[in-house]
Each structure stands twice: as structure tokens, then as C-alpha cells.
Image (tube, helix red, strand yellow):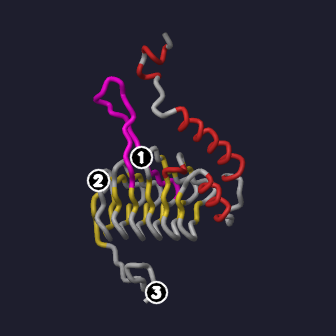
Amino acid sequence: MRLADSDPYLRPAFSRRNRLMRLLWSIVYVCFFRLSPRPLHSWRSFLLRCFGAQLGRGCHIYPKARIWAPWNLVCGDVVAIADDAMVYNPSPVTLRSHSTVSQEAYLCGATHDYDDSVFPLVHGSITIGEHAWICARATVQKGISVGDGAVLALGAVATRDLDAWGVYAGIPARRIKERRHDSGHDKTGADR
């Protein structure tokens, strides 16, 4: 009997295929993605698409951004993911058009069920709305939807859904004010 059969803590949380794909992605990330010059957004988008990411036009994903599973990443047009941002996405993470994830922000799509003695991994999808901004060092937990135009302030933690055009701060994040959205763009993002 293998030790993993007798001890549930040693059982892999993901399939062999998933682990192999993450290994291949890690090699491509280290050798080609991370070392690419900052302006080569199209090159990094190409690499992500090779691993199943669905990316719109004009995405700016910076070389030190960490994408755990590209095949679970969906981005609209003109999405930005800054250096040192972490997208931990065992389930799909969707970033809608013109959304921004700043430096060292963390989109955390999984946790463990601490009430279960086996401590299994539990994951859920995350959705970031159009024109939303996840500020530096902010965290979005699994299963959360961030509404269109919402702002999650520096270091804040979203533990529940964030309404559209609200500004949220703190741990857990609380709505502190309304965000203006008369920036010269209509709801589709086209100039007026």
C-alpha cells in the first residue's frame, strides 16, 4: 500500500494532467514569459493563449505577473495585470474589459475546508467587472464577483461580492464611498 493511499493529506488535489500542464507552463513562464521585455505584451498574450487562456485585444500582462493556470484565465479587451500580481486560478478567473489588477494584488481562487479532517482544497471562480480596479496588495477571495467600476483599495480584502461603482477598503472590505463614472466613456467604453 502506498503512503498516499493511507494518508489523505498526501493525495494530490489535482489530476496528473493538470500537474503536467502546470509543470510545462512553469518552464515556459520561467524561460520565455518572465524574461520577456516589458513592452512585449503581445508575446506574453501569445504564450498564455498557447496554454488555453482566452484574451481580448490589447491586454497588458506584465512579465512578473503570475498566472497559475492559463487555461482558467478569461480576459476581455484592454485588461492589465501588473508585475507581481498573482492569479491563483484552479477555477476560472474572468477579468472583464478594461479591468486592472495592480502590483502584488492577489486573486485567490482556492482555500482548504478546515472543518474537514482531510483538509480538502475548495476552489471557486472569481469575476472582476468592466473598469474595475484591484489596487496594489489587495486580495479577492474565491467565489467573489467584483462589480463593474468597483475599486478594491490598497491592501483591502474582498470577502463578499462588491457592488458596481463602489470604493471598498479595509479587512474585510467595506464600501466607503461611490466612485464617479462620468469619465467621458459610456457604459460600453466608447468615447462620447
The mark found on residue 160 in the picture is 2
Foreground mark, 1 or 2, reads 1
Furthest toward the top, the residue is: 1
Q: Earlier in the sequence, mark 1 or mark 2?
A: 1
- Magenta stretch? 103-126
- x, y percentage for residue 120? 37, 30
Residue at numbered disc 1: 109
Q: CA distance from mark 1 to mark 2?
A: 13 Å
Pointer 3 or 1: first along the chain: 1
Q: Which residue is mark 3?
A: 191
Q: Is residue 189 above or below residue 107?
A: below
Q: Is residue 4 above or below residue 48?
A: above
Left/right placement of residue 20 relative to residue 91 reads: right
Tell me the SS state at disc 2: loop
- Which residue does the image show at 42% across and 59% down from the upper left? 154
Mark nearer the N terminus (3 vs 2):
2
Q: Disc 3 and disc 2: Cα gap in Å?
A: 32 Å
Per the image, label 1 sits on a secondary structure element best described as: loop
Considering the image in quadrants, where does the C terminus appear?
A: bottom left
Task: Assess disc 2: are there few (<14), some (14-19) or many (≥20) residues with their C-alpha within 10 Å of its C-alpha.
Answer: some
Near-viewer residue (167 or 128): 128
Give the residue type at disc 1.
Gly
Q: Secondary structure at mark 3?
A: loop
Crowd band around label 1 with a 10 angstrom C-alpha radius: few (<14), some (14–19), many (20+): many
Tell me the amino acid under the disc marked 2: Arg
- The CA distance from mark 3 to mark 1 is 34 Å
**Residue that appears at 33% across and 33% down:** 113
Residue at image location 44% in from the left, 58% down from the top: 94
